[in-house]
Amino acid sequence: MTKKEYLSITEVAKLLNLSRTTIHNKIKSGEIYAVKIGKTFAVPTEEIKKIVGDIVGHPLSDDEKKKIDEVIERTVEEYGEVLKMLGKE
């Protein structure tokens, strides 16, 4: 599987254990950077790493970034179809 550069709001919500509404509100307020594509938003994978770094209180090491990439990839592989269905309005 290729590395994803962007995640949907649903994918970000699942990874951060927050609601889609919370993620959407954080995007609208500027707390989370996202790119608007059509009517929806896409969050760069690098933004997730930054958010996690802010949570842990220090810049992430390369090993920590690698672990996040692995979790993102595994989540998309395991729950991709469910995430797509949740993302439909």
Image (cartoon, grey):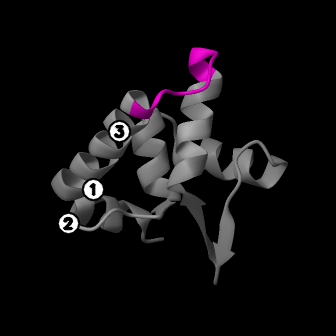
* Residue nearest the viewer, comparing 34 with 40: 34
The residue carrying pointer 1 sits among few (fewer than 14), some (14 to 19) or many (20 or more) residues within 10 Å by Cα, namely: some
User: Is residue 42 shown in magenta?
Assistant: no
Q: Which structural element holds mark 1? A: helix
Q: Is residue 81 left or right of residue 59?
A: left
**Which amino acid does the dot numbered 1 rest on?**
Val
Which residue is most to the front? 62
Vertical comparison of 63 with 34: above or below = above
Give how far apart the Cα atoms at labels 1 and 3 are.
15 Å
Tell me where residue 78 appears, x and y as whole percent: 16, 52
- Residue in view at x 48 percent, y 44 percent: 13
Identify the residue under disc 3: 66
Relative to 31, residue 85 above or below: below
Part of the protein shown in magenta: 55-62
* Furthest-left residue in this view: 78
Look at 63% across and 41% down and name the residue there: 22
Tell me residue 7's x, y (percent). Answer: 47, 60
Q: Earlier in the sequence, mark 2 or mark 3?
A: 2
- Per the image, the residue denoted by label 2 is 1
Amino acid type of the residue that numbered disc 3 sits on in the rendered structure: Lys
| Residue count near mark 2 (Cα–Cα under 10 Å), binned few <14, some 14–19, many ≥20 | few
Q: Are marks 1 and 2 in contact (CB under 8 Å)?
A: yes
**Residue position marked by numbered label 1 in the rendering:** 76
